[in-house]
Amino acid sequence: MTNDIIILPLVVHLFFSIVLMFFWNKVDFQKIFSVVANFIALLVAIWVFIFVYNNGTQVVQSGNWEAPFGIVFVGDMLAATLVLLTAIAGFAVSIFSTISVIRARLRFGYFSVFHFLLLGLNGAFLTGDIFNLYVWFEIIIISSFVLISIGGEKNQLEGAVKYFALNFFASMIFLTALGVLYGLVGTLNMADISLKIAEVQNRNLVEISAVLFLVGFGIKSAIFPLYFWLPASYHTPPSAVSAIFAGLLTKVGVYALIRVFTLIYGGEGFLSILLLTLAIMTIFSGGVGAIIQNNMKKVFMYFIICHIGFMIGGLALFTEVAMAGVIFYLIHDIIIKTNLFLISGLIYRIKGTTNMKKLGGLYANYPKLSLLLAIPLFSLIGIPPLSGYWPKISLILASFNAEEYWFFGALIFGSLITLIVIAKLWSEVFWKDQPKINFPEKFIYFDQLRIGQKFTFIFPIAFLTFVTLYIGFGAEHIQQLSQRIASELINNELYIDAVLKR
Amino acid sequence: MEILLAIITGVLYASGIYMIMRRSMVKLILGIILLGNGVNLLIFVLGRITKGEPPIIDSAEKVLEGVYADPIPQALILTAIVISFGLQAFAIILMKRTFKVLKTDDLDQLNTTDEDS
Amino acid sequence: MRTLILKSASSYLIPVLLIFSVFILLRGHYLPGGGFVGGLVAAIAFVLDAFSNGLEKTKTILKIHPGFLMPLGLLVAFLSGISPMVFSDLPFMTGIWAENPIPVIGAIGSALFFDLGVYLVVIGAALTIIFTISESA
């Protein structure tokens, strides 16, 4: 069994999803079962992480087929870390879903699909086969289509149409890239591709496949010219769904970019210029978008786009310092973006709106809660010693060393915009007096909830805030981890040797 | 054979992308279907079309000898077809629900998500 | 559209289609066929019944909601997938085979149960989709 330990996150989520499907109509049972299941999945993920941390990269050959022929699952440090982060975010969101998502939505198999989404995410992180990566991507998007359209409100359906059209298009481009790559190298195992792509004579086709991958993953991870589906769709579903989308769905695109552009297209010079330009534009357009929005959820959505640029830019620099910054930022970003949307869900439950013009007086009414919410918001800006600060040091250092001053400027600009917008948000939502508006009447406000129900709102946010605080104050551990992952990514021989058993 | 398939692939891609860029939701679905078929054909062509034996190693030998037909592209296409079958079914139901709620087929009318609320 | 020809033809065709789907399922291990195609053929049998006799009658024939077949099939496939991990300490999804083949069916292994799971899932999914579309029309 210990050989198969990295498969376990997949096995548990698949099993829980099937069990939840059998209890399709029993919503109360599903709530409890899903929270317990996510807790078990969290324990499994911690176990996998510790195992990989101590014993190095683990490889499982599914079906007992030898590596370049069969599908392999590779648990290297990056994959194990992301599986752990997925489990943390999944646990928090499952608790948050129990009360905040209304019953009419839960009745359509919400939790079952939610576990399928987590299954797809874990699979995408763990697989070592590029076609298998496509299959996991499809599992992710099918589950996310169901989650985004469940409930069937007007703006939700509109968002779902836009989300569907562009993500399906991205999948098709990904599949095209895959076809071109298979035609060039004749293998699908990523480690094997990495060895064989150097021998390909026709470099033009290699570059074309690289650009196709960039476009395919770029749409999924919302980089500069391809992000327009994100602000049109992410705010439409309930906050719990938005949280898991914001935390993990765009990051899986970033993960795929990191994996493909370190392992397969390592030293392609033109790509780094392209990626760097896109990163700068992404930071700029995301930041400008965040300033003009008045809805909290939309502000946070533009932050997602803005901060994707940080990671893509670090990937373009492709030095060990930059990669460490990227990985640290990825760890910080998954937790913080999930938390931000949970916060917007909590504020929506308290006030019945997320429009900043209509909000106010939160600090006067809920001082302790405001303090709790301040920590993730300040971590997002990167006020030292909170978590957003540390990866930016690495990124700024790397951009200085590489003499990429445009990217350096973009980093500073992105951080400054984040600071301005969070300051505006803080003064509008927390400090300003409550403006006189008509509160919706048929609405269950936070104050009317029982204490146990309130707990399901506060606990996930507090839990994720605690993780953020750990990332900030225990930055030494995370930095060591990031550097280890970065050196594994840059010296990809380790990965290849582990997969092909050389 | 390759040239014919290459031309068909190109036509499917072009018409698929053209249909996706129309305003109608029905045409969007049609475009997605055409594009999916184009991708499948592309994988088929790029996997090299050869007339060969099945790739089964005889029990007396260690390695495969002679010309063999690569089975992997077909496996990939089959998987892609199954996936796009599910996605297209979902798309049809989604578009139908959207049409019922919004009473329009025009993608330009789908703009309540951009309103400030 | 209820025509006598379709109605009387379907009453003969449906059992043939169902048996044919099982045949395709079983031959799938070495020859073209398998769970997915077999499941689609079986789903077509029920769709044909719905065309000729109406949707309500087909539902009474099915007795259970087709959506229930999806978790059932997934469970069968899942158990056959993890069985090598549990029983013989082999990696996930390794095929384990019974030593003696059974007449008619042939060699039995975990792959057959996986295909059976796929068969059930495909019937369930295809029928759910088609019933949903035709109900809301």
Image (cartoon, rainbow, N blue to C red):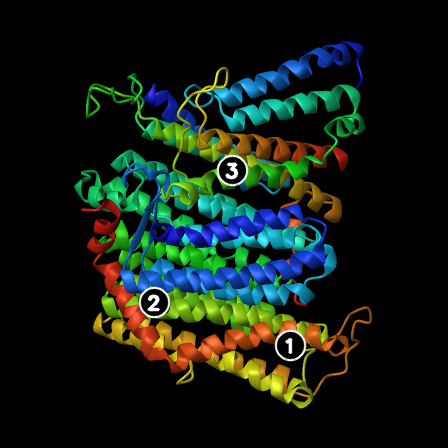
Q: Position of residue A451 (x, y in %)?
A: 71, 77
Residue identifier under label 3: C77
Q: Which mark is residue A226?
A: none
Between residue A261 and residue A21, name the one nearer to us.
A21
Residue B20 in the image: above or below residue A46: above
Mark 2 vs mark 1, CA separation in Å: 31 Å
At label 3, counting other C-alpha atoms closer than 10 Å, the crowd grade (few under 14, some 14-19, many 20 or more) is many
At label 1, counting other C-alpha atoms closer than 10 Å, the crowd grade (few under 14, some 14-19, many 20 or more) is many
| Badge nearest the viewer, 2 or 1 | 2
Q: Chain of mark 1?
A: A
Q: Which mark is residue A326?
A: 2
Mark 3 vs mark 1, CA separation in Å: 49 Å
Q: Are marks 2 and 3 on the same chain?
A: no
Quadrant of the rendered structure where residue A363 is?
bottom right
Is residue A493 toward the left or the right of residue A138 in the image? left
* Quadrant containing the N terminus of chain C in the rendered view: top right
Q: Chain of mark 2?
A: A
| Badge nearest the viewer, 2 or 3 | 3
The secondary structure type at the circle numbered 1 is: loop
